[in-house]
Amino acid sequence: MEKILEDGLLSSDFLMKIHRICQMLKIEPDINLLIVECDTLKEFNELTKKPYSTGAVYVSNLIITQPFRILKAKGVFEETLLHEVLHHLIQKNFNLPEWLEEGFILYILGTKPNEISGKSRLYLQRFLSEVRYEEIPDLFDRYRILSSNGNN
């Protein structure tokens, strides 16, 4: 992740969004993770077993992406990385149900239900029907992972 930031591949807005969301959730913006950019769509599909409509996948401190040039051509490079970084931050600090984690990320990034399909759409719709914006911090607190010394 550091290399991507150092190379200027992400806008300053990217980091501002992360910091704003971390403030809301009362967590540290620790984005120390590894990003693996696949060379081809075929390689991405073989590694992740995900369809080409999925731009990246997060698995325990690792983000596997389609080739950056393809994500940029689709106009979703930063949004895709931000989505996966949020999975990292949330899973590091909270033990959320899948629908709540994915629904929150889609919601906070401004995704509309008609822009997506499948489980993601169902999770976003559930989030929109069950969670009010002002309830998010308290709701997440119920799922917070406490460190061994009792602090987060």
Image (spheres, rainbow, N blue to C red):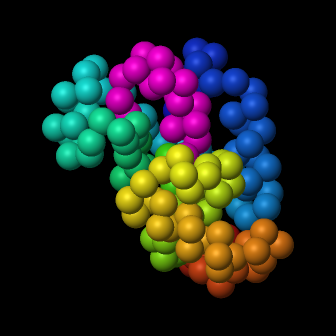
In percent of width and height, residue 72 lies at 50, 20
Q: Is residue 78 above or below residue 82?
A: above
Residue 90 visible within the image: no
Q: Main secondary structure of the magenta part?
A: helix
Question: Residue 95 vs residue 142: left or right?
Answer: left
> Which residue is drawn at the image coordinates 47% and 17% (left, top)?
73
Image mark count: 0
Residue 106 on the magenta span: no
Camera-side residue: 10 or 29?
10
In percent of width and height, residue 40 lies at 25, 22
Q: Is residue 31 above or below residue 146?
A: above
Q: Residue furthest front?
A: 114
Where on the picture, by quarter, is residue 67? top left
In percent of width and height, residue 129 lies at 65, 76
Camera-side residue: 47 or 131?
131
Q: Which residues are magenta?
A: 64-83
Where on the picture, by quarter, is residue 68? top left
Residue 70 on the magenta span: yes
> Which residue is drawn at the image coordinates 63% and 16% (left, top)?
8
Question: Residue 34 vs residue 11: left or right?
Answer: left
In percent of width and height, residue 81 lies at 53, 37
> Which residue is drawn at the image coordinates 19% and 28% (left, top)?
42
